[in-house]
Image (cartoon, grey):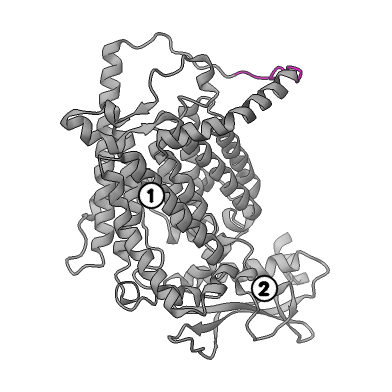
Amino acid sequence: MEENYTGFWGVLRRPFVLDLRALALLRVATAAVVLLDLAIRSTDLEAHYANMGVLPLAVLHDHVWSAYQFSLHAASGLWQAQAGLFLLAAGLAVLLLLGYHTRLATVASWVLLVSVQNRNPLIGQGGDDLLRMLLFWGMFLPWGRVWSWDARDRPAPARLDYFSAATVAYVVQIALLYWCTALLKNGPEWTRTGTALYYAFSLDQLLLPGGRLLYPHPDLLRGLTFATYYMELLLPFALFLPVGVKWWRLMVVGVLFGFHLGISVTLYVGLFFIINMASLLGLLPPTALDWLTGRAAPHVARVAGWRARLPAWPLPWHLRLERTREPSAGSRRVLRAVRETFVALTLAYVCWWNLDDVAVLRPTGRLMVAPARWFGLLFRVDQHWGMFAPVVFKDDGWYLFDATTADNRHLDLNRAGAPIVHTKPAAVVSLFKNDRWRKYSENYLFVSNAWMRPYYCNYLLRIWHENPVHAPLTHLSIVYMKEVSLPDYRVAKPVREVLCECEPEPAPTQEDAKVLDE
């Protein structure tokens, strides 16, 4: 590939030239992650997206809504409407995975992803920002040119290497993610004492078995802390070296794959590590893709043979999009220039946003004026890469949902109604149904989010009483057993903090019924 890009401008382009097959893998992986994300979110249609859940529409608009946001999911408070949108999003993600009308499927998938993320920002995390940006830049990438349904009726591309403003944006976006992650980690635990991972592994609500194995070794944790910080800070520079591009990319992809696999077995971060691994596939150089293609060829031929033996079942529908006439060469040049200009300006804006995000922690303050933020909020190119930054969260603990029954028994609704106990569970992380609930519970702690507490409390009461087998409750207290992480493996005594209390609404009396009848 490098020999095809000579001269001054050719050399400058080298780091941003991508293989069309790598872009196809990026498309497939992105669509697969969207489907997985939808599957996890769909288990909480009512709880997270309906008016009967923890964030009714009126509350969303009162507390966490921006005038520049849009959300189709906020058009109705019924879970049935949410289910319809989820099914539509899943269908579009399947089309994107197959590469069927790829551009249209990408745009529609991005719209629905932004829509569902805007519906409940209380359960969002950094991986959501990256997934959103992969779809955004994907709208301008030819990731359906090969290995797709669309490619069947088109001649094979004359060359597999591709360069555009969108490939520059994609590579820069990956670099920005890790650079900003490092720059935001400006606390002494990351830069001087090396205790960041010790505190991260002290968080029982995040700790997985792999982290338990590493936790008792402070020197190892200190080394891994500095290795993480400097890897995030320095490794992205390798993506911009114009010599030996394929080897630098293989190194970057290999190191970051190993890094995120390490995160997956040590810390409970939901889809974060999967999204990050999927985002790297577009960087694979031709050498790796030639090897993968060679290894996969026999399996592809076998599948094609099975498919040929299957009876042909005609689809009950057929989607065909046609232009009334093909655009002229001049029109195509104008459209390409407009697209390239828009992508370049958006990339500049994204860089500005990230610089502003980092500058907030500096004495000089923000770099972006408030009126300029509308573009980022409207198109959701806003992003924040502040995992464990600037320091690691130290207010660890676990939740008790202390419910009082009519006969004065105390049950823990967080453990399926078992008798209340105040001792720490063996695995705090097992108390969360999924990472969306873990993130919601984390946001629930903040004093600035005190407005959200009664809605969760009343939601828990309601779903408990929906089961006629459950004992009637007279009172519910949401309690956080706060256990601050201390240095040198010291254990703090848990402190019982009551975050919210609520009671079931009394049953209507005969007098109430008469008033309603009148």
Which residue has dot 1 on it? 252
- Label 2, on which residue? 414
Q: Quadrant of the N terminus?
A: top left
Tell me where residue 457 sits by quadrant: bottom right
State which quadrant residue 368 falls in: bottom left
Residue found at the far bottom of this picture: 493
The residue type indicated by label 2 comes to Asn
Q: Is residue 240 above or below residue 201?
A: above
Q: Quadrant of the C terminus?
A: bottom right
Near-viewer residue (156 or 444): 156
Q: Position of residue 141 (x, y in %)?
A: 39, 31
Residue plotted at (52% across, 35% down): 292
Label 2: element kind = helix
> Which element is circle 1 on?
helix
Quarter of the rendering containing residue 189: bottom left
Earlier sequence position, callout 2 versus callout 1 = 1
Residue 50: x %, y % from top left: 60, 53
In the displayed structure, 280 sits above or below 235; it is above
Q: Residue 376: x, y in percent?
A: 32, 47
For disc 1, the neighbor class at 10 Å (few under 14, some 14 to 19, many from 20) is many
Quote the CA–CA distance across marks 2 and 1: 42 Å
The furthest residue to the top: 325
Which residues, given as a range, are shown in magenta? 310-318
Q: At 28% from the left edge and 42% from the top edge, which residue is drawn?
A: 347
Q: Could you tell me if residue 500 is visible in this image? A: no
Type of residue at label 1? Val
**How far across and down, in percent of the image, does residue 327 sit?**
34, 12
* Left or right: 47 in relation to 444: right
Q: Is residue 315 magenta?
A: yes
